[in-house]
Image (spheres, rainbow, N blue to C red):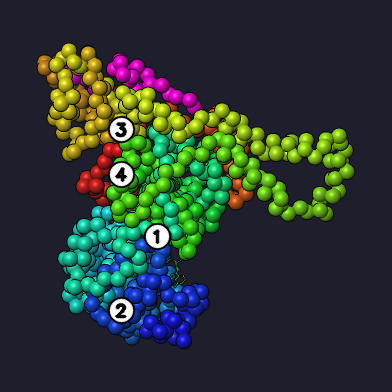
Amino acid sequence: MSIFKELGLNDEIANALADLGYKEPTQIQASAIPQIIKSTDDLKAFAQTGTGKTAAFSLPILQLLDTNSNQAQAIILSPTRELAVQIGNNIREFAKYQKGVKVATVYGGASIEDQIRQIKRGAQIIVGTPGRTCDLIKRRALNLGQIQWLVLDEADEMLNMGFKEELDKILDATPDSKQTMLFSATFPKEVESIARNYMTNPVEITSGEKNKATENVSHEYYIVNDRSRYLALKRIADVNPDIYSIIFCRTRRETQEVADKLIKDGYSAEALHGDLSQAQRDSVMQKFRKKHVQILVATDVAARGLDVTELTHVINHKLPDQIESYTHRSGRTGRAGKKGISIALVTRREKGKLFPIEKIIGRKFKEGKIPTGEEICQIQLMKLIDKVKDIDVSDTQINEFLPSINEKLEGMDRDELIKRFVSLEFNTFLNYYKNAPDLNNESAGRDRDERGRREVDENMSRFFINIGRRDGLRPANLIGLINDQGITNNLQIGQIEILDSFSFFEVDKAFTEDTVASFQDDKAEFNGRTVNVEITEKKRSGRSGGGGGRSRGRREGGRDGGRERNDRGGDRRRSPRSDGDRGDRGAGAKFGRNRSDRPDRSDRGGENRGGDNREFSSRRRRRD
Ligand code: AMP
């Protein structure tokens, strides 16, 4: 008998699973399926993404569903559109031999009328994102009054994305008699509070230890500084020629910037974030799934719906604001029995953030050394030689050219020939990395010899202000003066530099325009002096405090040109080209309050009808 039948599932379901190649249940399936079939108790399940949790909750629902009724009997809530679609499709596959099962998938950014029609056709299972589900309830198009099962999938992510209010409303529309099932990879206090408020004595099951990382993932950190962060990223990609990776960034802007640089430098990369249209996001995800793109630079939210099992690396370009998100990020690799590496690029200052993560994942980070140019060249060269060895040679086509080739190459011995062919392919790499500095020393050295200097924070805009020490200005006064302008609640203020007759300060880049506007028209005064504020270049002052230009350090390599981009991944030739535009662009170029600096809540966009661009100040980004 099929193991799935032993769990209490019927022949139709077991056959569908056999078609899908499911031979035996995963750990979470083995625990959850019989539990849900035999008991209506609420359920709290600790399950990482990729553990087979979709089948764990949907198979017992399919087993128990009343297919003769056209009432909505199950509502499954998921944080993103992509995940909802994936769950809906999975359920249809599981139910392919069951007659009369109807599933409606509802999410923002798509026609609500079509979705209403799906529901009206008598869908017994609704899979939805919280925003759209709420809208449908409000429109009375969705009646959850007869619901028997409510599943909160990736509950932590839904709360992270600020869906608490929607969840409350949806839960209020369901009967008390329902069975609530909460699946979450992490259990921060917000999820625990949902469990406390909405579940009665839930049974707890787990597919591993609560909040723990999977065994297959090793965790590494690399010490960088803000100058070497991108270079380190490139070196990690270069030393792993077959890399298939998601690089996680905190904001849409950071995501786009990193992706743009990688693309410009010839890497097979794409950006995925909430500023892209749904069609663009779908296309990027499709390319990545098909491995036509090797590196996906993404925000946490936008990457949620992406189901890929073979990632070699997850790279935290910057650590996430919420430490629980690290578990989600790293859980994207090491799936389906494969090994994976999760890398965090951290400055010495940020290193302390690893300790709470280690506590949560129950693992220690290992310090990695940023590969040297030599190591990279060695690996890339061997990769090239392997390719030469493995290449399919079409004798019939080549043979006819051999005599003239031989004639041209006459007099060259084997070694000479090898050198020339390798150089043809490899000179770019060699040249690029010829005098490349050891970035490990750069980071450490910089920390030592620039102790008095400030790190440039890419998330801050720098301002000149026309008052200084002589006007009696102290840092506390300046903070007070900035706060008095009422730019926003809890405005993040960065470095302050008070000089004799003028000063500099930094504020969260997202509020650049608001800061300028609030100081306009000579409104502000300090000790009788009219205050004047202007955006200034992000120059770094030395210890002298004179506001002098900062040392830009060595630039790594130059733009080599000559390599073309293609979208086919696989055999694509990547080259470590220029280090991209590392110039500190004046904040003025970034005028305008750009939502891209906020944590990406792309899926909200679709959820809120009529472009309701609510701000989510409660999740303000912290400074590093
Ligand atoms: P999920 O955690 O539900 O997103 O599932 C992760 C991946 O594992 C999906 O590609 C599923 O199709 C696959 N999967 C789930 N359960 C099993 C199983 N019992 N055997 C083989 N593959 C499975």
Asked whether mark 2 lies closer than 8 Å to ligand 1, one says: no
Which one is nearer the viewer's eye here, 114 or 442? 442
User: In this orientation, does residue 413 appear?
Assistant: yes
Separation (CA) of disc 2 from disc 4: 38 Å
Q: Residues at badges 3 and 2 in contact (C-beta under 8 Å)?
A: no
Labels 3, 1: front one: 1
* Residue annotated with mark 4: 353
**Region of the chain picked out in magenta, as a range:** 530-556
Could you tell me which residue is drawn at 40 percent across and 57 percent down?
331
Could you tell me which residue is drawn at 50 percent across and 45 percent down?
269
Asked whether mark 3 lies closer than 8 Å to ligand 1, one says: no
Tag 2 secondary structure? helix
Crowding at dot 4, Cα within 10 Å, few <14 / some 14-19 / many 20+, comes out as some
Q: Residues at badges 1 and 4 in contact (C-beta under 8 Å)?
A: no
Q: Which mark is residue 35?
A: 2
Sequence order check, earlier mark of 1 and 2: 2
Provide residue 243's location: percent of width, then percent of height. 53, 49
* Residue annotated with mark 3: 460
Which one is nearer the viewer's eye here, 450 or 185? 450
Sequence order check, earlier mark of 2 and 4: 2
Q: Amino acid at mark 1?
A: Thr
The quarter of the displayed image where residue 384 is located:
top right
Separation (CA) of disc 3 from disc 4: 20 Å
Could you tell me which residue is drawn at 53 percent across and 36 percent down?
372
Which one is nearer the viewer's eye here, 498 or 454? 454
Tag 4 secondary structure? helix
The quarter of the displayed image where residue 221 is located:
top left
* Residue annotated with mark 1: 214
User: Height in image: 46 above or below 613?
Assistant: below
Sequence order check, earlier mark of 3 and 1: 1
